[in-house]
Structure formats: C-alpha cells, structure tokens
Amino acid sequence: MPDSPPHDWVTRAADDAIRHAQQQYGEDLGDHVITCASGASPSGPVHLGNLREFLTVHFVAEEIKRRGLAARHLHSWDDYDRFRKVPAGVDPSWSEHIGRPLSAVPDPWGCHDSWAEHYKEPLVASLRELGVEMVEVSQTEMYRAGTYREQILTAVRRRDEIEQVMSRYRTKAATAAPESEQEAAAMADSVANDDENGLTGQGATDDLARFPFKPYCRDCGRDTTIITAYDEDTTDLSYTCTACSYDGVTNLTTESEGKLVWKVDWPMRWHFEGVDFEPGGVDHASPGSSYTVGKELVKIYGGRAPSFVGYSFVGAGGQVKMSSSRGGVPTAAEALKILEAPILRWLYVRRAPKQAFNVDFGAEVVRLYDEWDALGKKAANPDKRDAQVLAFERASSTTSAGRLPTPEVVVPFKLLSSVADVTAGSAELISRIVGDVGHEHASVAQLEPRLGKAMTWMSDFVPVEDRTTVRETPDAARLAALNEDEELWLRQLLDRLPDHLDLEGTTTLIYGVPKLARGLGLEDAPTDQVKQDQKDFFRLLYNLLVDADRGPRLPTLFLALGADTVRRLLTPPA
Ligand SMILES: [Zn+2]
C-alpha cells in the first residue's frame, strides 16, 4: 500500500481555499488567481502575535502555488481605522488625535509621514527577511479614492437588514478569556468586538443610531460624529461633531469622507476582493464576533465568506524585557535578531493555528537551534519525509525566493554563542576558534547569518549573571589554598599544556590529568575514583578561570582563551 504524502494544517487550509474558489468558478480554475487575505491595523508595534496573521496566509498561499495554481497573498493595512488611545511613552498631547484615521495621525518620533507608516515600515522589512511576498492595500487609499462607493451605498440602502443580523448576534457577543497578561494586552487592542457603531449612534434617533457608515468630521478629521439626518434620495448625510461642534453634510454618492463600520467593512471586502481564505485571531471567531456576523452580512453583497481558520495567541518567554523597551510581546524584528528567518517561520508552521505558543528569547533558543539542525539532517533523507519534514520544507523555502538564507557551514548555536560569550570578541576571532574546535570553514561569511545572531543573543538577551566572565587576574586566595590533589592536577596540566592548543589534544589532556594523578595513562579508561576526581578538577578549573562552578565546555573554553591566558590564571602569583 503506498504511503499517502505527509499533510498538515496548511494542506487542509489550502484544500479549503481551493474548494472555495472552485465552488464559485468551477472545477477547472484555469488562470483564476486564488486570493488569501490578511489584514492588520498599524496602530502599534506589530508583535509576534500579529505575525501569525501574515504567516498563516503566507503558508497557505505558498501551498496553493506549489500545487501549480495561481494564488496571491493580499494584505490590507487597516490604516483608515481610528486612532484609539495614546500608548504609554507617547506625548499625552497626542490624545487630541484620538478618533482620526491612523494614517492622519502624525508620527510622534518624526521619522515617518504618519503613525501608521511608523509601524508598517519595520514590519514590512521583517516580512521581506521572512520571505513573505504580498500585495499591499492601504484602506485609507481605497476609501479616500471612493473605491467602495457602490458598496457603501448598498450597505446604507440595506441597513435595516444589516441591523437585523447585528441585533441577532449582539447579545451573543463573547470573547475568549485571555490566558496571560500579554494576551490580555494584545486583545485590549483588538477591534474584533468593537461596538459596531462606535460613537455614530450616541444621541441619534433610532433609525440613524445603527448606521453602517461613519463619517470623519470634515473640520477636525475625527470620527466623533453623530449622524443627524440621511436623505435617501440625495444620499446627503448630515452630522454633528461632538469634538469640534462642526455641523457637516457629506454626500455618499460624490464624496469619500468616512468608512463602513468594521463588522460591515470586513465582509464587504471579502466580496470586493474575492477572498477565498482569511484567518483571524480567535477573538474574531467567537460567537457574535466579526467573522460570524460577517458570514451573514456578506450576503447583502451576494458574496460568500472565505474559508477561515482561527488562530491562537503567540507570546514570548525568556529575557524579553531586556530587549524590548516597551515590555509586552516583542516584534518580528526583535525575534529576527536572534533567530534565522526559516526558524522563525518554522515556529509558526509546525503548530496548528489553534495552538498557542511562546517564542522564547532565553535559554530555550539553544535547544530550538539544536532541534532545527536535527530536523535539517532528517530532511536530507528522502525516506524520512513526514509531517515534520514537510514543516521544515515550508519553513526553509518559498516558491519565488527559493531557499531562505541559512549558514553554508552549520555550527551548533550553542558553540557559537558560548565562544561569543567567553571571548566577547569579534566575528573573526569567534570564527577562528570555531575552526580550531573542529568546525572547518573558509570564512566568517560561511557562518552567517547564524554567527551574528549568536553574538547578538549573548550580548543583548542573555542576562549578565548567566554570562561567562573570564577572570582578569588569578585568584590568589584560591591558588594559595589548593589541597594536595589540586596542586598535583594543576602542575600536571601546566607541564603538558602546549603553546598551541588543538581540540583533540586539549580534550585528552583535561580529561586525562586526573588519570595521571591516579597512576593511569592519559588514554586509559577512567575508574570510578577518577570520574569523581574529574568532577572536582573541572570545578576547580571553572573556579579559577571564570569564577563559577560551571561554564562552556572546558576544551572550548581553553581554546577560546588561548594557552597564555589559561597558564596565567592557573599559576599562583609569584
Ligand atoms: Zn470635528
């Protein structure tokens, strides 16, 4: 019986997206481009949780392309959404911009044209590094250009039907309880359960209280508008601004000064863009939330909801606070400082979207790299192709970019980081030592991008107390208090320590000294007594070299320090 090819959540989501397109365009899709859509509101740093939106869509679009079908990743920047609150650390006077579109709020740091651009740009750079290619759409541009005029008029004309649907779900609105502080903070920023009319309805008469369109005030640019009248024939919409008291009229047929409320906006775009697949945070998928309601509302456009997967939260562990000035969940850019792009992709593809996970910036990083390297070896064997290898393949390459950058010579992250730790030295020095300990390579470049990430991890993410500090001067007190065994060990070590250390000789010597002291040869198998001596001897070496009971592997430490430094720190001052 032939084995069926490995499959995973991406396979299934792609199946669903293709079926969605086929139901509309027929079994043979020909040149039809299947649309996989993501959306994000650039209201703050786009953190690792938000990254799931992009990568979920990316992997599904890639799978469809791998099958020889045409697909696009369409990304909407929801930069026409209102600025909701001034985050900590920003000039409180920015509160005057609350209610304006994110694209119209100035950048407090002055480096970009707007608040929205300030947060878009670094994410776009990270996505490029991650091999994510997408067609980007600015909702500010779309709305301002009047692109959705027909769709807006349809929603307004059929607002009673919309209200019927909305009211049916309004009482069901419920959101999954956050499971952590990080998650709660992320959800507080979500638009998923925004009251569908925001301020539009306050003080308005019943008919206008649930209007599906909200104008931005022509005078002050805020959405603090109350609709006072709507003329069905002329499509004139009258409003009063509660912030600046402006009384205005905007014409929905000829002017473009506002947007559909979120719960109508989203399904409108499913139809407008022909979306076949779109994921959403679990907060978007709860009963009464935007996807559920949108599924009904899209019918007023004659459309159908895309296939959907809800994804769970992504948090961070380890020394996040060190790296992140704001606290909270770090961004993709921060993760890419220490993780090779394929590894960060792998974290997102290897788990089903429903599973929450943390990206760890602490000691787990070492284990993650080891796991990745082991999987890479397995993937090299075609007989072992399974779902894990499939995830490795998805993480490693894209249909257009091919293989994403990985080091030409793979050296364990643990070794690179511990040499970086001991030497606190340049890439050249680390590269030389790594060569000395048996990982032959011709240049620093062959170790990149991993070497740079290991160096950054050690200097910026590992707490000082967990780093290795090489003693500057010998520990005179300890050296004066050596017992007989210790004195013998050190003498035998120093007598045999060559000026030029190589890995094999140094390893044999360090393990062999306690054997010599018990009358055995360097190469003899250790007795139980020798094994105990080795432990004591190693601890002594760590004490004298790095002022700790443990540290990097001793041969590595010796080679990184060089014979002169080792000799100096192990010799009692004259
Ligand atoms: Zn105003």
Image (cartoon, rainbow, N blue to C red):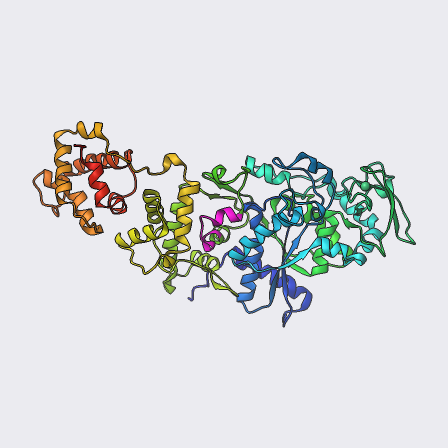
- Residue at left 84%, top 36%? 203
Q: In the figure, 181 relative to 561: above or below?
A: above
Q: Which image quarter has ligand 1?
A: top right
The residues colored magenta run 332-344
Residue 101 at x, y percent in the picture: 72, 46
Q: Is residue 333 magenta?
A: yes
Quadrant of the image occupied by residue 569: top left
Residue 390 at x, y percent in the picture: 45, 59
- Which sits in the foreground, 1 or 168? 168
Asked if residue 397 lies left or right of residue 455, the reply is right
Residue farthest toward the left in the current orientation of the protein: 519
Identify the image quadrant of the N terminus: bottom left
| Residue 304 visible to an observer of this rendering | no
Asked if residue 389 lies left or right of residue 235, the reply is left
Q: In the figure, 4 relative to 427: above or below?
A: below
Residue 240 at x, y percent in the picture: 86, 41
Identify the image quadrant of the C terminus: top left
Residue farthest toward the front in the current orientation of the protein: 574
Q: Is residue 369 magenta?
A: no
Tally of numbered discs: 0
Q: What secondary structure is the stretch in magenta mostly built from?
A: helix
Residue 210 at x, y percent in the picture: 81, 43
| Residue 66 visible to an observer of this rendering | yes
